[in-house]
Image (cartoon, rainbow, N blue to C red):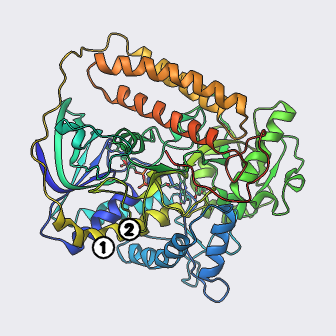
Amino acid sequence: MYKTDVLVIGAGVAGLSFAIKFAEQRSDLKITLLTKSHKQAGNTAWAQGGVATVWDFDTDSFNKHVDDTLIAGDGLCDEDIVNIVVKEGHDRVKEIISWGTRFDKEEGGDYNLGMEGGHSEHRILHYKDVTGKEIQRSLVEKAMTFPNIELKEHYFAIDLLTQHHLGRNITRLSPNTECYGVYALNKENNEIETILAKTTIMATGGAGQIYRNTTNPTIATGDGIAMFYRAKGLLSNMEFVQFHPTALFNPAGENPDFLISEAVRGFGAILKTPKGESFMENYDPRLSLAPRDIVARAIDNEIKTRGLEFMSLDCRHLDQTEFLEHFPNIYEKCKSLGIDVFKDLIPVLPACHYLCGGIHIDQHGRTSVKGLYAAGECTSSGLHGANRLASNSLLEGLVFGERIAKVLAAEIDNFSLEENIPDWDAEGTDVPKELVLITQSWKELKEIMSNYVGIVRTNTRLKRAMDRLNLLYNETELLYKNTNVSTQLCELRNVITIGYLVTSSAIMRRESRGLHYNTDYPEKYDYLETTWL
Ligand code: FAD
Ligand code: SIN
């Protein structure tokens, strides 16, 4: 048994920024961060385009950033949250700069502000095309300067501890469900440890690995959302899965799919067919820089109607020196596949990129479970609504990390450790006989989600998905009851749960809005609703 004051599950932008801001205020308390892999893993380190914030107040304004976010969110954003994130985000970005995060500058010393789809102004601060890696590096370095922060790598959180573990019956309708920490698998010695905490912060990131094509690294299996759902917490808007329009098509297949940043289109690249004809004029006056839901659907439609595997991105007309300065990593990756971006079209296809729904939180990151807060991609804060505006999610992680730290610095004194939690009970389980069953089920899950719950949905497809998911769920739960716990098995359980949550919410939403497009309900409702699970 391990005891801590604050347990943070996840060490990406959300978890780290919370830990730093909390440690600044409460040097008397112990903060323990878990990451299921090494400390640079997670979606944060993969971010390319940058972080959106108003910087040039002569041309841009908070109101413009708010409006762009609301337009992308297609009517489902919480306007108060959007205002909070846009305004406080500016201070948070200044703060990480003061902690050592580097962003690219012009020769005169001003920041070079990038452009991405759905933004009306240049406002993306970036570090070449590896902004996330730079932010992750600087936040890890800053966090490690606090003696009261401990970062435990290769610890896999399995399940949240609640009154259920004290033998009480908890349902989704129970008031006052409480969280006391987690059971976690120490991957280095394969022991399951009980980690008790006065409060827990969920910052486990996204779930892109439920789809065949995804830009998300392999750790993105929705663990936090699945754990929270099993603990009977309240989720919202899980049907809104964002597909990035331009992942690099690699005929050999790779996981994750390599991203060709939207900033490349912001820099002037144009979407074309493989024969070199532009097509976005048939879909939206904003052409290649329309919001992501529109561009991804357009590419999906062109691919399907033409019977092809990809569309193309044309960079041949762009300034080569500047391109190499801004996108060295993208240039090298294309080159490694034999694509010269200055001579060839880049083959691209949409890939699952971001989950807009998740753990429902209030303005201070509180969830429906007492003692449990959440931040970052695993949450549904109201910022993104039905479709996230590009480069708004690093900003969201920074803002909510700080907001939780501020309220928790005061609230934590109301919480105490629950010491009566029993150790993990592995009785009746055995070593897995056929690990291949796990990989096969995961492949099936990806096929189900990609074929039936993808960019374009129909009632029949969603029903098919649900029937198949039920079968996978039953098989996997049986395996889980009889088998020793492993990361692979837990992740499989979690991705099936996320698949179920996305599909159920998609079935509930009888309209087409933002990222959810169902050809059986092509219109938008006049009234707006959040989907709850
Ligand atoms: P993450 O950074 O994903 O961190 C999750 C953490 O949780 C990790 O430490 C992981 O190990 C840990 N974890 C997960 N499950 C468990 C478990 N069971 N037990 C223990 N630990 C666990 N957004 C932008 O704003 N701008 C961009 O330019 C941008 N580009 C992107 C490019 C790519 C290729 C991708 C994939 C995403 C991009 N995004 C971008 C989105 C953005 O990167 C993420 O939404 C954001 O970084 C999520 O941060 P997070 O802290 O919530 O989660
Ligand atoms: C990108 O660089 O295109 C990704 C930006 C984002 O997802 O916010």
Residue under the image location 64 percent in, 32 percent down: 450
Amino acid type at mark 2: His
The residue at which mark 2 appears reads as: 364
Query: Does 207 appear above or below 51?
Result: above
- Quadrant for residue 143, please give it: bottom left
Give the x, y percent position of residue 425. 17, 26
Q: Quadrant of ligand 2?
A: bottom right
As measured in the structure, the alpha-carbon distance from the residue carrying label 2 to the one carrying label 1 is: 8 Å
> Would residue 36 be visible to someone looking at this image?
yes
Q: Is residue 312 left or right of residue 365?
A: right
> Would residue 312 be visible to someone looking at this image?
no
Query: Does 250 appear above or below 426?
Result: below
Give the x, y percent position of residue 386. 63, 55
Whether tag 2 and tag 1 are in contact, CB under 8 A, the answer is yes
What is the secondary structure assignment of the residue under circle 2? loop
**Which of 30 and 42 lies nearest the eye of the viewer?**
30
Amino acid type at mark 1: Lys
What is the secondary structure assignment of the residue under circle 1? helix
Residue under the image location 84 percent in, 43 percent down: 273
Give the x, y percent position of residue 403. 37, 70
Mark 1 closeness class: few <14, some 14–19, many ≥20 residues within 10 Å: some
Q: Is residue 308 left or right of residue 529?
A: right
Residue under the image location 23 percent in, 69 percent down: 411
Q: Which mark is residue 406?
A: 1
**Which of 21 and 132 lies nearest the eye of the viewer?**
21
Q: Is mark 1 within 8 Å of ligand 1?
A: no
